Image (cartoon, rainbow, N blue to C red):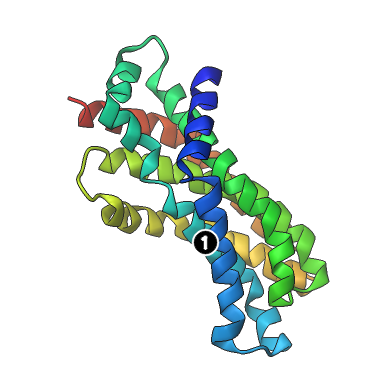
Amino acid sequence: MIALLRRDLRLAVRAGGGFGLGLAFFLIVIVLVPFGVGPETEILTRIAPGILWVASLLAALLSLDRIFALDYEDGSLALLATSPLPLEGAALMKALAHWISTGLPLTIAAPALGFLLSLAPEAYGFLLMSLLIGTPALSMIGTFGAALTVGLRRGGLLLSLLVLPLYVPTLIFGAEAVRRGANGLDATGALVLLGAVTAGAFALLPFATAATLRINLR
């Protein structure tokens, strides 16, 4: 499984569909927001938690269709399905590779970009913590969505329509944690619920992803 993880990370870096694309999109969205809503610090400070989380969610969405597409095209996915490696483990490694190449860079970059949105100083720690807890769920849910659309021509739009509703709980609890931190309130409840969503995704979705892949490969 470690070899599969390394392979997917190399492909993400070489293809430019993970780290570079997601991070560039994240930066562009954050830079454009002040031009759209105006430079008023009070407004930017109020909307910053939601904007940062929405931008992270959309940036993670960009590279989802590549999780299984390349393996399906060259036949590697069929070999994975018949190999001794459990398909559930392969799905887990795919999600982990997507998070390392997309979610982790977004998490690291978010506090720096929060400065552009006049994010309250008290919220930076909560922003980093919420993204560390929540972005793995985005990758795991996205992996499940990619399995649903594998083999479909131009399945990127369908993938977005399937995955975005499943992202809503992560978005709500993640943004709420940052918002509470910015207002000096207790954000423990939001972080716990966010962690519960991530834990539930990693407990259930590898099995659902593997079952979906087996159906699509028949």
Identify the image quadrant of residue 101: top right
Estimate the x, y position of residue 131 in percent, counting from the top left. 64, 53
> How many numbered circles are shown?
1
Q: Which of 4 and 96 is in front in this view?
A: 4
Q: In which quarter of the image is the C terminus?
A: top left
Asked whether residue 160 appears in the rendered view, the answer is: yes
Q: Nearer the viewer, residue 146 or 26?
A: 26
Identify the image quadrant of residue 33: bottom right
- Looking at the image, which residue sits at the far top? 84
Asked whether residue 172 appears in the rendered view, the answer is: no
Residue under numbered circle 1 = 25
Determine the residue positioned at 72% across, 87% down: 42
Estimate the x, y position of residue 45 in percent, counting from the top left. 70, 80
24 lies above or below 205: below
* Label 1 crowd (10 A; few <14 / some 14-19 / many >=20): some
Estimate the x, y position of residue 32 in percent, counting from the top left. 56, 77
Determine the residue positioned at 28% across, 26% down: 74
Estimate the x, y position of residue 142 in percent, counting from the top left. 42, 46
133 lies above or below 111: above
Determine the residue positioned at 55% across, 25% down: 6
Q: What element carries label 1?
A: helix
- Looking at the image, which residue sits at the far front? 14
- 140 displayed left or right of 77: right
| Three-letter amino acid code of the residue under disc 1 | Phe
